[in-house]
């Protein structure tokens, strides 16, 4: 009976040993769990930080900035040295020409379209010239009339005109002689009382008038032989020159109806259509335009940049730079600083800088977005 009871008793020493082993196992498992959680936390934070940095770099490279970006520390082949500044801007034509008209008129013909290449002196637009052509013809007629008057004065009086003046003088002298004889006759009759004093006075007046007419004829005859005065000839010459100047002015206005290209270039915009009125920039007539065509030389391009004042100290006049158009990121063009604005823009807190594209090609177009990379190397070192 006692043996059976001993078999049923619980061994307290074995139970305590088992409890101690189970406790140690829980402690080890808890420690491993804590270590695993800590490792997961640190590794997850590391990968998240690396991914955020990669996303930030990708976003900074794909989004064009209007102002200068922060300089990078990397060295690239674009500038031949360490990059100091990257700025975005727009490609512009160095010289953009809006061809206008010197005269008012209606468009009668247009010879170019947008994008057409043109040469210096090429006819672009022709205006209705009927009014200006009539003015030229009127001026030519005035010149011919003035030249004829001058030739008449320079040639002097013809022999026939001098002979006619001599004959007139002889006739007036004969009239004077008759008037004097008549006066002597009535004076002799007055003594005998055959005539009145009134008749004698009338005869004396006729003699005086005949004598005055003879003097006028003699002076005219002398002037006829001398010819026109030099002052009259000079006045006629001046009149000829005045009419010739008016003719040249009318011809200039007529030529202005033919609007030609002032230089080689490409048509950026055609600003008028057939039948529209064109005027000068000063007239300002309602519905009229002063420019007909916009031109630019696409072989003379620049990039216009607005550099932040805080980044302006990172560029220099002789600094080398490379331009990359946003449309063709794999194409790179050497450039150099061509212009730095003498004053800053107060509203934008920027300074405008223009860089000259040294070797442009057909891929570049005005108003395209481009990125310019400035390097520490100078233009001489980069070349």
Image (cartoon, rainbow, N blue to C red):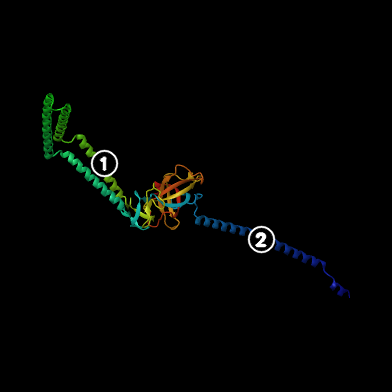
Left or right: 325 as drawn, with respect to 164: right
Residue pushed farthest front? 193
Q: Position of residue 139 (x, y in %)?
A: 26, 46
Q: 122 or 360, which is in the foreground?
A: 122
Q: Position of residue 75 (x, y in %)?
A: 47, 51
- Which element carries disc 1, helix, strand or loop? helix
Q: Position of residue 362 (x, y in %)?
A: 38, 57
- Tell me where residue 142 sits by quadrant: top left
- Tell me where residue 240 sits by quadrant: top left
Q: 39 or 307, which is in the foreground?
A: 307
Q: 115 or 250, which is in the foreground?
A: 250
Local crowd size for mark 1, using a 10 Å CA cut-off: few (<14), some (14–19), many (≥20):
some
Residue located at (24% from left, 40% from top): 239
Q: Position of residue 250 (x, y in %)?
A: 29, 47
Name the residue tied to disc 2: 37
Left or right: 98 as drawn, with respect to 243: right
- Seen in the picture, residue 11 relative to 221 is either above or below; the reply is below
For residue 242, which numbered disc appears in the image? 1
Residue pushed farthest right? 1
């Amino acid at each position: 009976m006692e043996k059976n009871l001993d078999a049923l008793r619980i061994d307290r020493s074995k139970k305590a040993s088992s409890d101690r082993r189970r406790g140690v196992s829980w402690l080890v498992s808890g420690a491993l769990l804590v270590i695993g959680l800590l490792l997961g936390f640190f590794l997850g934070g590391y990968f998240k930080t690396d991914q955020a940095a990669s996303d930030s770099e990708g976003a900074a490279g794909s989004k064009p900035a209007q102002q200068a970006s922060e300089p990078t520390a990397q060295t690239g082949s674009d500038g031949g040295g360490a990059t100091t500044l990257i700025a975005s801007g727009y490609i512009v034509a160095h010289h953009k020409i809006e061809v206008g008209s010197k005269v008012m008129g209606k468009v009668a013909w247009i010879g170019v379209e947008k994008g057409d290449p043109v040469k210096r002196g090429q006819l672009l637009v022709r205006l209705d010239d009927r009014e200006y052509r009539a003015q030229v013809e009127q001026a030519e007629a005035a010149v011919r009339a003035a030249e004829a008057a001058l030739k008449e004065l320079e040639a002097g009086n013809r022999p026939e005109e001098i002979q006619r003046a001599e004959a007139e003088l002889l006739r007036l002298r004969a009239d004077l002689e008759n008037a004097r004889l008549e006066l002597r006759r009535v004076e002799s009759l007055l003594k005998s009382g055959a005539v009145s004093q009134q008749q004698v006075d009338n005869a004396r007046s006729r003699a005086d008038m005949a004598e005055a007419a003879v003097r006028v004829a003699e002076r005219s005859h002398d002037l006829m032989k001398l010819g026109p005065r030099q002052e009259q000839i000079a006045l006629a010459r001046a009149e000829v020159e005045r009419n010739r100047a008016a003719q040249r002015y009318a011809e200039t206005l007529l030529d202005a109806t033919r609007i030609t290209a002032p230089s080689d270039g490409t048509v950026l915009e055609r600003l008028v259509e057939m039948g529209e009125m064109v005027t000068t920039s000063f007239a300002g007539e309602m519905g009229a335009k002063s420019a007909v065509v916009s031109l630019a030389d696409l072989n003379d391009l620049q990039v216009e940049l607005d550099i932040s004042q805080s980044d302006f100290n990172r560029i220099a006049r002789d600094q080398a730079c490379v331009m990359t158009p946003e449309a063709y990121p794999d194409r790179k063009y050497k450039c150099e600083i061509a212009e730095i604005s003498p004053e800053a823009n107060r509203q934008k807190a920027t300074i405008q800088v223009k860089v000259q594209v040294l070797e442009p090609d057909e891929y570049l177009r005005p108003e395209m977005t481009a990125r310019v990379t400035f390097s520490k190397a100078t233009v001489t070192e980069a070349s």
